[in-house]
Amino acid sequence: MRSEIKYAFVRTVPVLLGYLFLGIAFGLLLEKAGYHAVWAFFISLFVYAGSMQFVLVNFLSGGTGLITAAVMTLLINSRHAFYGLSFIEKFKKMGKLRPYMIFSLTDETYSLLCAERAPKDLDENKVMFWIAVLNHSYWILGSVLGSVLGQLITFNTSGIDFAMTALFVVIFIEQWYTYASHVPVYVGAASGIASLLWFGPDNFILPALLLTVTVLMLLRPKLDGRKGEEAH
Amino acid sequence: MNASEAILIVAVTALCTQLTRAIPFLLFGGKKEVPGFVTYLGGILPPAIMVILVLYCVRNTGWTAFPFGLPELLGILAVALLHIWKRNNLLSIGGGTALYMILVQFVFR
């Protein structure tokens, strides 16, 4: 048992750094929006979705409707639905741990689990479980830390919300490198800008997302054969 | 927004997030074949959504009045260049955010 935790810890060190940093940024933003450490703790415990939680801060500080919140969450996190496809068989063998494994399948945990080849003398299921638990705890720790720091910090934090924009830009560049076709990017950008001009800043995101899905479905005969995603 | 409205929003976000993670196991947990359009969208949607999220972040920027969105544009440019150069998430996000904070607090006031 102990050696599995130790091994999992070493594997998760890069995520530890990333989650602490982003978690702190999230906690700071949440604190700035008027929600304290208890909120940060429970949101990170129950929602546990990096980029979505940054969007959630916007929901909480402005008056976003429940339907908009629901549809945005479903679409923004829709990529998680595709992560699960790779683990249907593997998680079946995990018994009681299975629900937690499904719950905690974030981008980072997914990429670690994909790459995981545990040594033979360790129980692979336990290793996967501890990787998931450790990552989750780093995220909670970071966001509570950020929230507490936010209360203590006295310097001018205005502009710190740009961390969310920066996060999305970074994810975007990583995807740009991974994907063979850039057509989806152009479709997303065009739909987004068109909706922004047409519907204005407060109502643009849903039409933009729906328009993107529609256009990409129409382009399917052209794009599907070429495989948007490169084998990696 | 009062506390109960906030809790409701958090709960909806949590449930929908869980739904997206549970869907493949609910639908294809048996031996059912994954439909082609699902695989297609899965492969193609993420970068399109990320661009829209970047637009979402700058949706309230005033492009027609001072400072004409310059802090946002320069910040995004810095993040992109740092990331293309080093490909280190912390450096790109930290550096870009620091620059943006300096720009909005000291340069374009």
Image: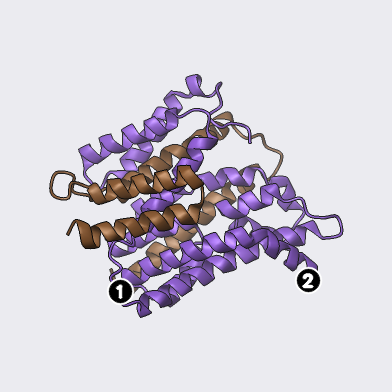
Chain colours: A purple, B brown
Kindly identify the amino acid type of the residue bearing the numbered disc 2. Answer: Arg
Where disc 2 sits, the SS reads helix
Residue occupying image coordinates x 81% and y 60%? A123
Q: Chain of mark 2?
A: A
Residue B23 visible from this viewpoint: yes
* Towards the viewer: A23 or A227: A23
Where disc 1 sits, the SS reads loop
Above-or-below relation of A188 to A34: above
Above-or-below relation of A182 to A5: above
Could you tell which of marks 2 and 1 lies nearer the N-terminus? 2
Kindly identify the amino acid type of the residue bearing the numbered disc 1. Answer: Phe
> x and y percent of residue B80 in the render?
40, 44
Residue that numbered label 1 is attached to: A155
Residue that numbered label 2 is attached to: A2
Residue occupying image coordinates x 53% and y 65%? A139
Which numbered tag is attached to residue B46? none
Q: Chain of mark 1?
A: A
> x and y percent of residue B74 in the render?
30, 47
